[in-house]
Amino acid sequence: MTLTSCLYWALAPEFAEGIGGLYRQSLQPNAEGQVSARPETPSPADIARCISRRAGSVAVITIEGPIDRTSLVGWWSGKIFAIGQDAIRLAVEDALQDGAVRAVLLSVNSPGGVVAGTKELADFLAEASAVKPMGAYVNGLAASAACWLAASTGRVLAPATAQVGSIGVIMMVADFSGYYQRMGVSFEYIASGKYKAAGRGERPLTDEERAYFQGLLGELHAVFRGDVASRMHITAPAEQWAEAQLMLAAQAADLGLVSRIVRDEAAAIQTMMEVSMPDYTREALAKEAPDLMAELKAEGRQEAEAEVAASLQEKLSAASADGAALAMAAMRAVCKEQDVQAVEAMMEKATALGLSPVQLSGMAGLFARADAQPKAAAPDSRQAVLEALQKSHEAPLNAEAPKQTKSLLVADAERRAAAGR
């Protein structure tokens, strides 16, 4: 089986005829009908530079048109009719090696391409996503092989009306046997192995050969489906998204085939900038930016203290409200209604002024008590002192003091003194 007689394509069938037209166009002679020497074909590295650009810290790699093993460039126009897998790989490798690039975005608008090499390129892109954040933006269409490559990044971004899917494999076998029969030409193949001549266009397929090819396509489809499901973490039943159906990105997002709906490519680039921001650890931040680390700590401490204070105040307020309600209920049980009303009025004033219980207690002397009596005139200070002194003794100060009896020795001494005079 050769590539000239049959091709395996991961390609949306509705785009197959258009792709064939592009290939035929690329092989046409110039306008004068002359076949001239073909200009030098750009190298994969040239194509890689052509499809790459920088948007800030994001490398954007454009995948436009069909995907083939190598790029197909028009002879005269220089237009890229098919983008090569080799050029895509080189463009991604350059982005990974560029220290100024923090993330890579594939901007995809493609109906798909050949199966050969797509699995290998998809695996490479999945490995690259472990080096730098990778993503794909669906710039209109990401079908079949293009969807396979986009999903391999693990992050598919798309506007709501973009088309995604066509997860399937197709094979085309041309049957020219009727034409050759009319022309009187017949072919006979001598080959070892019963499937060696299967798919040759000079004769129709047998049922056994058709089943053989169908089995190969089924195995390729299973690999395709499995890769997309694992890298996009899709849990929806396969029949909803993996039977080669195309769907709008909004529907694909519900199934997991699209990670996020974005407005346009600029929004996709912004998303990649955000996901590529460095994830500093505490130790790395303390080492590289100690002042910033200290500031963050101080802010965190202040926020924590504020939260604790607010929580404590809330609890105290709740406890105070409960205590006030209990106290008022007790007063109503034992006090007069006018006293209860007076206390309620005082509590309302204290609440309006924002006074705490301690502050209210300290100001108690400023408020008139309900049972207060008019103060009597102040007594004479001398009289008050006298009364205080009197109260401190058992007998009044003007009472006659009791006489003391002298001892015999004292009396004899006094007589001798008198006689000596």
Image (tube, rainbow, N blue to C red):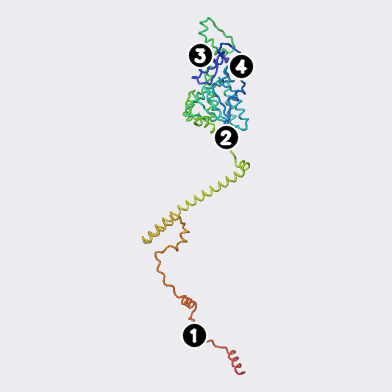
**Which image quarter: residue 373?**
bottom left
Judged left or right of residue 3, residue 346 is left
Query: Which badge, 3 or 2, comes first in the chain's sequence?
Result: 3
Q: Residue furthest top?
A: 184
**Foreground label between 3 and 1:** 1
* Observer-nearest of 205 and 389: 389
Marks 4 and 2: which is nearer the front?
Answer: 4
Q: Which mark is residue 276?
A: 2
Label 3 vs label 4: CA separation?
A: 45 Å
Q: Nearer the viewer, mark 3 or mark 4?
A: 4
Q: CA distance from mark 4 to mark 2?
A: 41 Å
Between label 3 and label 2, give the one nearer the viewer: 2
For marks 3 and 1 on the same chain, the one whose residue lies earlier in the sequence? 3
Q: Amino acid at mark 4?
A: Pro
Q: CA distance from mark 3 to mark 2?
A: 53 Å
**Can you give x and y, in whole percent of width and height, for residue 93 in the image?**
61, 27
Label 2 sits on a secondary structure element that is: loop
Q: Does the residue at mark 4 contact the one at mark 2 (Cβ under 8 Å)?
A: no
Q: Give above or below for 10 relative to 393.
A: above
Residue 207, label in figure: 3
Q: Is the Cβ of the residue at disc 1 closer than 8 Å to that at disc 4? A: no
